[in-house]
Amino acid sequence: MRSLISIFDLSVPEIDGLIKTAEDIIENPDKYAEKCKRKKLATLFYEPSTRTRLSFEAAMLELGGSVLGFSEANSSSAAKGESVADTAKVISCYADIIAMRHPKEGAPQVAAENADIPVINAGDGGHNHPTQTLTDLLTIHREKGRLGGFTIGFCGDLRYGRTVHSLIEALSRYENINVILISPTELRLPSNLKKKYLTEGSYRETKSLEEALPELDILYMTRIQQERFSDFDEYLKLKDSYCLNTEKLNAAKKELTIMHPLPRVNEISVGVDKDPRACYFKQALNGKYIRMALILKLLEEAENDREYHPAADFIIDNLLTCDNSKCITSIEQEIQHKFRLTDAENGVYRCVYCERQSKKN
Ligand code: CP
């Protein structure tokens, strides 16, 4: 069964196909109004959400389908200790497709391994948020007419911001993209992501938004992620690191595209909303269209029973245990710890669920 857990579950031609479908939906909504008649989407949200959950629900309703689900863990049997695996098995009896958000990294992967229906990762902790990435790619495509040949600045919480991580991963597959990473030292992009997805000379780091702004074709602002900090004083120290306002925008290009996955706290002044370069509310709308395209694709593949066999390159090894307290393996009942070998010479493995590295001696 085909699910979407990471943006890398989709090839570049498949992403291009989803963007094409989303743009066709925007042009011809009536053509799609009954495409999901009698189909049900279950939204299983163990963490708060406005855009992702409601755009998924709006997407299914506009395709002629129905929705069911929960918007917080406490209103589900998770509050009684039910595992993600059991929940996924049960929901497979009631729905045709699942969208899941969970605070633990890898939880949607566990759901996909246990469900008989497609599972879409709607955000797992600080790990991945692939449908936000699809939303961002659609927005860039609609605003710039292309997915390469630009300078993009990521500003704010680059350490915990899963939308930034997923978008950088996705953009690494397109050509001629310069990246400027704008953050306080404490919130820099994790070095493993820099090493894996950014090439020497194609990116630089700075603390100053003002210094980077004149160079940018796209500015991707992010909120400082209070919920991911273990030390609240550290959050208080960093929370007001950046605020984009109309005055600062005077130094920016006329054709700049300002994006933000939202919610914003105070990193973009409300005065910027009227600037034609502000695209973050259009971005939220694009989220509905790309999720319509994704639901259609996964349901069509499930219906045609196209078996999907991802490379079974992981190993199950009880000698290795993931030590990431944010990984789903830290709470899920009787889960087997699975790892991929990433560096044979040094015995380095990566957890299949959260991608934390472990070493085997
Ligand atoms: N962008 C985003 O994921 O928003 P929500 O948290 O409101 O879903």
Image (tube, rainbow, N blue to C red):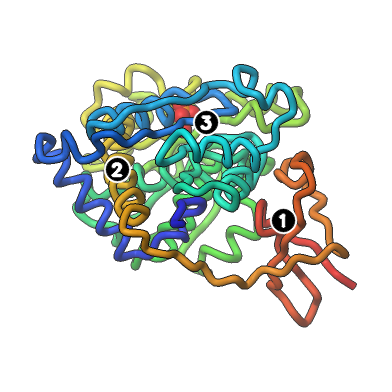
Q: Alpha-carbon distance for marks 3 and 2? A: 19 Å
Q: Position of residue 190 (x, y in %)?
A: 64, 52
Toward the right, the furthest residue is 361
Instruction: Say what amino acid the circle numbered 2 marks.
Output: Ile
Rendered position, 42 above or below 265: below
In the displayed structure, does residue 51 sit left or right of residue 238?
A: left
Q: Position of residue 288 (x, y in %)?
A: 30, 34
Quadrant of the image containing the C terminus: bottom right
Q: Residue at x 18, y 35 (%)?
A: 34
Foreground label between 2 and 1: 2
Q: Closer to the N terminus: mark 3 or mark 2?
A: 3
Q: CA distance from mark 3 to mark 1?
A: 25 Å
Q: Which mark is residue 269?
A: none
Tell which tag, 3 or 2, sits nearer the viewer: 3
Q: Are marks 2 and 1 in contact (CB under 8 Å)?
A: no
Task: Name the residue tied to disc 3.
Answer: 44
Look at 77% across and 70% down and name the residue there.
Answer: 348
Judged from the image, the secondary structure of the residue bearing numbered disc 2 is: helix
Q: Earlier in the sequence, mark 2 or mark 1?
A: 2
First of labels 3, 1 by sequence position: 3
Return the mark for residue 290.
Answer: 2
Residue 34 shows in the view: yes
Disc 1: which residue: 356
Q: Are marks 3 and 2 in contact (CB under 8 Å)?
A: no
